[in-house]
Image (cartoon, grey):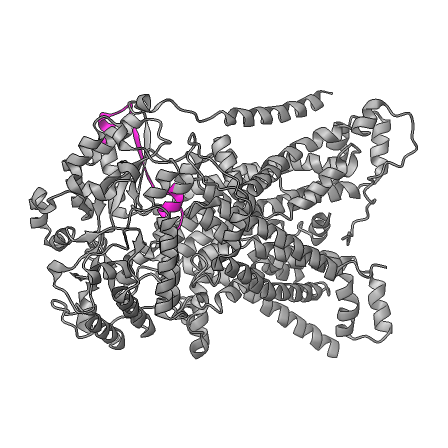
Amino acid sequence: MSTSTTSQRPPDDTFTEPQRSRSLKERLLGKQPLGLVFSAPYVVFLAVVFAYPFGLAIWISFHDYIFTAPNVSVPHPFVGLQNYVTALTDPAVLRSFLNTLIFLVINVPITVVLSIVLAAALNTGIRWASAFRVAFYVPYVTASVSLIGVWLLLFSQGGLINSILGPLAPDPSWLINSKLAMPSIAIYVAWKQLGFYILLYLAALQAIPKELYEAASIDGSGTLGKFWNVTVPGVRSATVLVLILAIITGANLFTEPYLLTNGGGPDGASATPVLLIYQKALQQTNPDVASAIGVVLVIAVGILSALANRVGGGSDDE
Amino acid sequence: MNDRGRRVLLHVALAAAALVFIFPFYFMVIGAFQENPTNDPSSLFPIGGWTTRNFSDINSRVPLGTALLNSAIFTIGVLLGTLTFGLLAGYASARLRFRGRSVVFVAMLLVQMIPFQLLMVPLYVLLTRTYGLGDTHIGIILPFLVNTTAVFIFRQFFLGLPESIFESARLDGASELRTLWSIALPLVRPAFVTVILVTFIGPWNEFLWPFLITKDVTMQPLAVALANYITNVSQTASNPNGAILAGACVLAFPVVLLFCLFQRYFTSTDVGSGVKG
Amino acid sequence: MKKRTAITAMVGATALLLAACGNGGGGGSEETANTTTGPITVWFSNNEQELAWGKSVTEQWNKDHADQKVTAQEIPAGASSEEAITAAITAGTAPCLVYNISAAAAPQWERQGGLIDLKTFSDGEDYLTKRSGDLLNGYKGQDGGLFQVPWKSNPVMVMYNKDLFKKAGIDPEKPDMDTFDKFIAASQKIVSSGAAKAAIWPSPTSEFFQPWFDFYPVYIAQTGGTNFVKDGKATFNDDNGKAVWEFFHTLYADGVSPKEKSNDDAMGTGAAAMQMAGPWAIASYKGKIDYGFMPVPTKDGKTADETYTFADSKNISMFTSCKANGTAWEFLKYTTSEENDGAFLEATGQMPIRPGLEKAYPEYFKANPDYVAFASQASRTVDVPNVANSVEMWQDFRNKYSASVIFGTTPIPDGLAAAEKSVNDLISQ
């Protein structure tokens, strides 16, 4: 993945400089051991905040574990895959993964298509481009909590959207309709995140050489032809990144089902794995099953991201 | 002519899209100052019924001042952490050759793959139990202390500097720290604006983590206090819709303002190159 | 090289800071802990009147106990107070006392080691027996532990808006809606006459506690006082349970009960003509609407004095994270004295769980006839079962109920059977 635009030297990881006499210290710690000191706080941070909890989550998922008050000790026997079996035979859990899939199927295409089209349009040197950009970015920078307050009012039964739609309004209304709750969330998230993806595409677009467009013009391509034959392939690596980020966002949905559809309603039609992790770990005190769901989720995200990378990237990098 | 027509069409289409994006904000601001915001389309362009009651209403149940202060402490803490530790890590991984440099880089990439929510529960136990950081500012800040995206952005900027300046600095006998402080830093000043904007959004808007770790209302940042208000308290307010919208405004306003002020520095190239690594 | 040292020092300081924080916690033995005094924190529910009472009683206490200052707080954010408390126990940040403990959640906190058995106080059992009498038995934990102090109940009745009833052509003084059929017919009248958007608007969301304010009171009334769980088995998969599910299903299917949560207080704005409510509602709605109360309906109708209902009781527990148990215990006794129970009744209208309530506070009930019906109803209530996995059990029940009753996606007999199986499985775990 490199659509870098700033002129830069490739990172020099291999120490290919002419070998002068290297001291023992240099051989052990590298040429500029100060780098270790500089990186240390960040590395400690990663270890404390990511590596250790991740390891603990995996450990918990293989044990019978409950949270206890401090100073209370209870045995945490090893139970093998039992938590995974409990999690994966629970219809609510399966439903939540299905919901995530529904989310991705709706959200990802909308996100990719709209952001690439809008970025391309913004990139044509039109007037007021920066005003338009602000409009697209603002939902991205605003907190979900405040935006959800607004969407709740807009999309409720007697809300503005339904008043405008009149007889076309869905029944039951958007957020309590088991067929529309997840799509509503998918559209909300697409709206909220689009600005960031537009930003990524705008960066990628700068990297496409002008000559390619000129050549396409000479070949007689129209606007559409140029978009399809030059722009789309030109930003492919950005597309892979957008795909992966959208998948991660989709897998991490919590605030939206928690607040927008009142805890994944109706009937779990918009429940997500992360919402269940939260419910099981904190409401029902089953952190072991919750961790198992989490580990499955990480594996699923990994596989999907690798797939996205495969489909979007690699194959014909000449 | 055809070309001109097409350009007009493009502007109209973009303007329409922008309107869709902005509309909920318009609805939010108008409703926040209305005595009784309704869902009727005709009420979108109100001529009367203006009030600031909604803000005092929400302030009576949620300590807005305290909550804003907590949000500010949270955000500033994360910014400080990112601007020091993130900067150092970004610089080291871009310009210094030391053992383990590639390991750090790979770790940076992997971290972005793990959903934070999985780590949340063990981390919660770790921070509250082992370190006793429940209901403390450090506990709220710690998981966000260094924004990995920001590390990438710094790294990209430092990579973009020509090697020759570093060589001449070394020839002059300047220490690495001095080279970083007085030579490299001034050259990557634009990176700071980008990093601040990218980093600011995270803690300011974060809901789940501070919601978990703070049980004391006087420690809760605004996003948490507002969510609490929306789910629990708003029903008994005299004008719950108005109060919700007013709260949403208070939360959204600082970040939107900051963004609009600095958006011209927030160029796409920076973030684009930053995120890609 | 001065700057390098500075950086190293900074890193070192951070590590020290982390290490220093790691040594928090730890505590003495139980006996000494129970006499420790000092400042404590106490959580109250976010009900306005309750909070006001809590703050005033705390203020009085603080006047006389400068060295044992009590800080009163609202229970923090969360969809329900239960999750906030669970998280706080795990973290060791729970307060000393919480005045909003549901019997449904207490067993799980007991299992977590979060609650203090009040028997460990020398006068613990005596005091609780003195204040609650036989009522105490329903709140004992495993092995008879006293983890909850019975405090107050909110016997659920049907509250209605008299003006809206008049508009719909229903006699507000004698609504005559004690059977399911009559209730449904009147509900249809309310909506079709345009008097209100909704006849009754139970929250259609899926929080585990929602059945307590729709299904459970009606089920208790219908069965004449049968608990949700009896002898370790779910009781509701029978004709009674089915009749209640069908009753609510009709309300939703006819559109007289909306399937979407109300964004505001539907009863207060007149969007709904009725709601299930306890005596707390009187203080909240006084002066806003003209209200009346009637007993919960049953299939064939019952008289008021033989109708049972859901107690919706809330109790007080002390938490193991408390650092000043002695103060907490004294404060607990202070707030549940006959005088302060009376002040609580006065301030909130909720019923202290004490035997002979009407006789204990005769002036109050004379001055506030609105509450007499509740005081009488308080003697015919059933609470949630005091069993482990209770929250998960109610959550599963709610999910099945929601699918069958509210959204009609699963046939009622199937939903009932599935709910029964899942509840039985959880109890036997």
C20 lies above or below C284: above
Quadrant of the drawing holding the C terminus of chain A: bottom right
Left or right relative to C369: residue B249: right
A90 lies above or below C109: below
* Region in magenta: C60-85
Examine the rendering and report whether any part of residue B13 can be seen. Answer: yes
Left or right relative to A312: residue C323: left
User: Is residue C204 shown in magenta?
Assistant: no
Examine the rendering and report whether any part of residue C159 can be seen. Answer: no
Residue placed at 74% from the left, 20% from the top?
Answer: C1
C190 lies above or below A46: below
**Coordinates of residue C232 in the picture (x, y in percent):** 31, 51
Residue placed at 37% from the left, 39% from the top?
Answer: C111
Q: Nearer the viewer, residue B48 or B227?
A: B227
Left or right relative to C266: residue A216: right
Kindly indicate the quadrant of the structure image that contains residue A242: bottom right
**Coordinates of residue B12 in the picture (x, y in percent):** 62, 72
Residue placed at 59% from the left, 70% from the top?
Answer: B16
Q: Nearer the viewer, residue C402 or C293?
A: C402
Residue placed at 30% from the left, 72% from the top?
Answer: C250
**Coordinates of residue A153 in the picture (x, y in percent):** 42, 63
User: Is residue C65 shown in magenta?
Assistant: yes
